[in-house]
Image (cartoon, grey):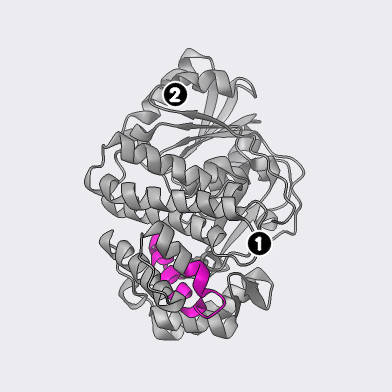
Amino acid sequence: MYDFNFNISTKILFGKDQLDNLADEIKKYGEKVLLVYGRNSIKKIGLYDKILKIFEDNSINHFELSGVVPNPRIDKVREGVKIAKENDVDFILAVGGGSVVDSAKLIAAGFYTESDPWEIVIKNEEVNNALPLGSILTLAATGSEMNAGSVITNEETGQKLGWGSEYVRPKFAIMNPEFTYSVDSYHTAAGTVDIMSHTMENYFTLNDGAYLDDRFAEAILKTCIKYGPIAINQGDNYEARANLMWANSWAINGLISAGKNIDWSVHPMEHELSALRDITHGVGLAILTPTWLEYCLDDETSEKIATFGYNVFDIEKSGSKINDAKKAIEALKEFFKSLGINLSLKEQGFKEDELEIMAKNCLSNKNKNQIDGFKPLKESDVLNIYKKAF
């Protein structure tokens, strides 16, 4: 294992009655809150009214930024920074899924700079301070409630980029699985894939001796395989929703990447898909991940992929690592299909002449000549993966 630092400062309040603690948690940091949320889902489930009642009962002043969408936009972040500055807020509460939390993180960092918040994303502006923020989670997918990362889309430049800072790690996260009951089957499936993809990005590495990390990762993957279909078919199954929600946090909070040297591969490739076509992130990940593994499969990687098959999908050993690795990839593909996801870029509306553009942008947006992941990928390799997934 490589040297590492590990610190998760986010306080988790998990369960059915944790909203009762909201006011106390906020008042540790301030009493003027910017409430950030999406469109109408939190109003439909009654969560919005409950939050406003808590604010009223506890003399918490609040201002609102609504309308955050999946693949969150920089324009909405700019609007949030403006509201926060004009009203001198001292805390941000993000209520929703990862797109809302990601937006809140950039608003929190943008509050203390005169520069455009996009300058933070493209790393022209260093983050030296941020407003404190907390979250109330309504979707299990991105794990943004328990980490320091964020992904933002700029429609003007056609870019979807990740950035991060310890200053924007949420102070607390309220996680009531009941708040995810209203998530439809399509987005539950996509969220399950997102959790699995985060896990696999950390899992598929070579020669790092991080045995414990990989066993943790396999447990998260098996949890998704067990409970994803249950949550899809029984939306109000508390056990399924709870296990997915908890898996969501641990897939990407640093636990299963500790001691590893990692450069994620599938996420930067998918970001080009959702930047161009605005498709659901988890769907793009489902399309690309099996194809990426097929492309990476060789004598060096076969043992890790086969081990994935043995320990996650209970594939029996045949004596051939290559054949068992192929079975593992096929099992993953069939699982994604069983969730109702079509694994074709063409079926998602992409055109063949767009693949080369996306491959070029994928590397240029990373400011690198190649992705140094499970297997090194140059622009030509990324293009070949897109073509295989088409």
* 314 vs 234, nearest the viewer: 314
Residue 90 seen: yes
* Residue 277, above or below 119: below
Please provide the residue range marked out in magenta. Answer: 276-305
Would residue 74 appear left or right of 69 to someone viewing this image? right
Report whether 309 appears left or right of 200.
Answer: left
Task: Quickly name the residue at label 2.
Answer: 19
Residue positioned 60% across, 34% down in the render: 10
Name the image quarter holding residue 30: top right
Q: Where residue 298 sits in the image (x, y, percent)?
A: 52, 80
Mark nearer the N terminus (1 vs 2): 2
Task: Check residue 153 for magenta coloring.
Answer: no
**Camera-side residue of 363 and 6:** 6
Q: Is residue 350 shown left or right of residue 148? A: left
Quadrant holding the C terminus: bottom left
Q: Is residue 278 visible?
A: no
Count neighbours of disc 1 (C-alpha within 10 A) and say few if under 14, some if 14 to 19, many if 20 or more: few
Per the image, label 2 sits on a secondary structure element best described as helix
Residue 372, compared with residue 63, is above or below; it is below
Crowding at label 2, few (<14), some or many (≥20) Cα neighbours within 10 Å? some
Q: Which amino acid, by three-letter code, is at mark 2? A: Leu
x and y, in percent, of residue 276 in the image? 46, 70
Question: Is the magenta region chiefly helix, strand or loop?
Answer: helix
Looking at the rendered image, the disc whose residue lies closer to the viewer, 1 or 2, is 1
Q: In percent of the image, x 52 and y 48: which residue is there? A: 216
Q: Are marks 1 and 2 in contact (CB under 8 Å)?
A: no
Work out which quarter of the rendered image holds the N terminus and state it.
Answer: bottom right
Q: Residue at x 55, y 18 (%)?
A: 24
Q: Amino acid at mark 1?
A: Asp
x and y percentages locating residue 314 in the rendered image: 36, 59
**Residue under circle 1?**
208
